[in-house]
Every structure is written in structure tokens, then in C-alpha cells.
Image (cartoon, rainbow, N blue to C red):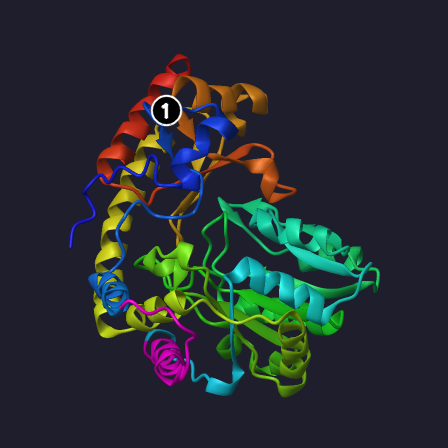
Amino acid sequence: MTFDEEINRVGTHSVKWDEMEKLYGVSPKDGIAMWVADMDFRPPACVQKALEEVIAHGIYGYFGDDGDYLAAIQWWMKNRHGWDVEAASIFTTHGLVNGTGLCVQAFSAPGDGVVLMTPVYHAFARVIKAAGRSVVECQMPVVAGRHVMDFDAWDAQMTGAERMLILCSPHNPGGQVWSVEELRGVAAFAKRHDLIVVSDEIHHDLVFPGAKHTVMPLAAPEIADRLVMMTATTKTFNIAGSHIGNVIIPDPVLRAKFAAVVNGLGISPNSFGLFMATAAYSPEGAEWLDALMLYLDENRRVFDEGVNAIPGLKSMPLEATYLAWVDFSGTGMRREEFTDRVQGAAKIAANTGPSFGKGGEDCLRFNIATPRARIVEAVARLKAAFSDLQ
């Protein structure tokens, strides 16, 4: 089990590597892809073995009897998160962007408002707008280097037209692990404004030492009648191409509404994803994950120390995810200038901050889930690109 191996992904239909020149002007020949949120590591051997067994059998028919798959999800949530999940509450979607879209359809109507705590994962706003709903951006100020929830300001923003709140927990792009107190604040806010809470916890396994993630059903059981949980194996085990996710709904009334949308669209999961998820949610998968987090923790240290040594740059302390959020406002540069230095001079493709909504204007997001040699190289390139500030 090694994460130092540099695997060439160019020419493999990788969005991260094969699309970055078109989108960022950074060639894969000499550039570093640090944008799309997938890892440059192979998944656990147990996942590879599961796929090899399917391929060796050679028949790819309809998947039946999902008992082992559901039991694997239940085992993982209980053992890693202390959360008891009923099998009947689990829906399988084609990833969690699809899950988000289904929630928007199930729990809101065209013209309704959907609340986002920005800056936040850009796909949420895209899905909301495409469904004819209104994005309500509740911006989070940064206090002592951390995004904080400003409920008083957000209360004043509400008009009564809002129907849903999408919570990103842990937070992407800031990497915060929300405290139980903060999560209870979200629950109280939702109750005050009669909002369904969709808690996207896709990063809840990717938590660094010193931080403790609490799943929303345990943090705020009082909103069980308005809570929808979204989890997945895809970020945890680097199997995003399997396009599989879990939408877990404890409340039977909400469950029936969601089921009506799923059934109306004729959705059923991809069998390859079911085999991969079942294999990943296992003791072998857990062992791989523990090793991954130790590796990423050192990547985090190397990246943050290097970036924070550059005058004007500040990497937000990362408690979870593998996505570093770097603030360039201290350089005094316009967004176009610091972005050009990163993409043009350093030849690094990183996500631009405005795509995450209000509060992201002066930032870039960097994916550090790549072999450490690339992290060291990326830091060296950034130092060179901003050498006139040092």
C-alpha cells in the first residue's frame, strides 16, 4: 500500500488531467492538476479485487439482492460514525450531485429558495438553478482563519420563500469540521424558517487527527422529521467514476416524497458501483483509509507550511477533506493577476474561488490528494511565481 507512486492519468479520459488545458490553459505535459476533487491514488485492493471477480465472471446482468450492499453501509456508519441506519431508509443514487438534484425535485417547487452557506461546493448552485429554483447565498465570514456561521445575519435574509438548506459537512472548500454546537445552530435555524435540511457529508470519512466529525442525526436528533443525509464511498475511496451515492432519509414522510421522484424517473443503480461500494465498506477498506489519512496529513503539513511562508498567501487550516483553500487577498493583487501567476507561471490548475459563491472572490482551491513529490513541486512553483513578494 503506497501513495507515493506517480500514476500517469493523461489520456485515460480523466477530467482532472485531460481537460485542464482546455479549461485552465495548463498543459498536462508540464502542469500539475490540483482542481477536480478526485485523488491520484489507486483505491483499496479489495475494491480492485471485487471488480476483477465481476469481470472474470463475464456476465453483466441486472443486479439483484442488495442485502450485502445495504449491510455494508450499515456496518460502516455504525463502526466509523456511531450511527445506526435502517436499511429501509437508504436510497442509492448516481452520485451525490444526482442526489442533490433529486432532493431539490422532491422537497421544493420551481421558484422556491434553496439556502447555501457560501463559499460552498459549486455543483449545488448549478443544480438548483437548472431546476428553476432560486439560490439564496448566506455568506460565511472568516474569523480567526475559519469560516463561521452568522445566523443573525441569515435570519434577516429569509423571506419565507425558502424551502431547503443544503449543508456541506465537513465543509468544502474551507475544510472545516463543524462542531456539535454549530450543527445544532443549523438545526435551530432550519426549524425557525421551516426548512428541509439536506446534509451532504460526502467528506465525513476524510477527517484529520485532532478533529471529530459528528453526523447530523446524532448532533441534532430534534430535526429528524426534516433531515436528509447524503453519504458516499466515492470521495473516501477514490471511486468517483462509479457514480454511486447514498441518500439516507430517517423520516417516513420525507422518504415517501423522495421515493416518488426516484420511481418517477426510473432510477436504478449501476451494478459496478454496488460491487465497489460493498467491497470498500469493509475492514480492509477501513485499514486503507487510516493509512490514507496519515499520508494526507503530511501532505497537508508540507503544503500549508510552504504556502503560508509566501507573503500575502494564507492557507485555511484544514480539518477535513483534501482540498486546501488559499486566500490571496494579502498580495494586494487583482484576482486575474494572482490566478495568472498560478496557472501561467506555476503551471498549476486550481479551482477559482468565485465558482464557490460569495466569499470566494480572493481564493483558489488546491487538491492535495496526490503523491507528495507533486506537493513539494507545487509549493516550489508557487514560491517562484510569487518570488517578488519574498
Q: Is residue 146 above or below residue 347?
A: below
Residue ranking furthest to the top? 388
| Front residue (pair 95, 80) | 95
Residue 69 in magenta stretch? yes
According to the image, label 1 marks what residue? 382
162 sits to left or right of 142:
right
Residue 292 percent coordinates (x, y): 25, 55
Residue 129 percent coordinates (x, y): 72, 51
Q: Is residue 356 above or below residue 262?
A: above
137 sits to left or right of 359:
right
Residue type of the residue flagged with mark 1: Leu
Q: Residues within 10 Å of mark 1 (few under 14, many from 20)?
A: many
**Residue at the location (16% across, 50% down)?**
2
Where, by quadrant of the figure, is residue 67 drawn? Answer: bottom left
Q: Is residue 385 above or below residue 302?
A: above
| Front residue (pair 174, 104) | 104
Which of the image's four quarters has the C terminus? top left
User: Quick check: can you spot residue 206?
Assistant: no
Secondary structure under the numbered disc 1 in the rendered image: helix
Residue 50 percent coordinates (x, y): 26, 68
User: Quick check: can you spot residue 137?
Assistant: yes
Residue ranking furthest to the left? 1
124 sits to left or right of 287:
right
Q: Which residues are magenta?
A: 58-79
| Front residue (pair 287, 26) | 26
Residue 27 percent coordinates (x, y): 39, 24
**Residue at the location (43% across, 84% down)?**
84
12 sits to left or right of 97:
left
Residue 175 in magenta stretch? no
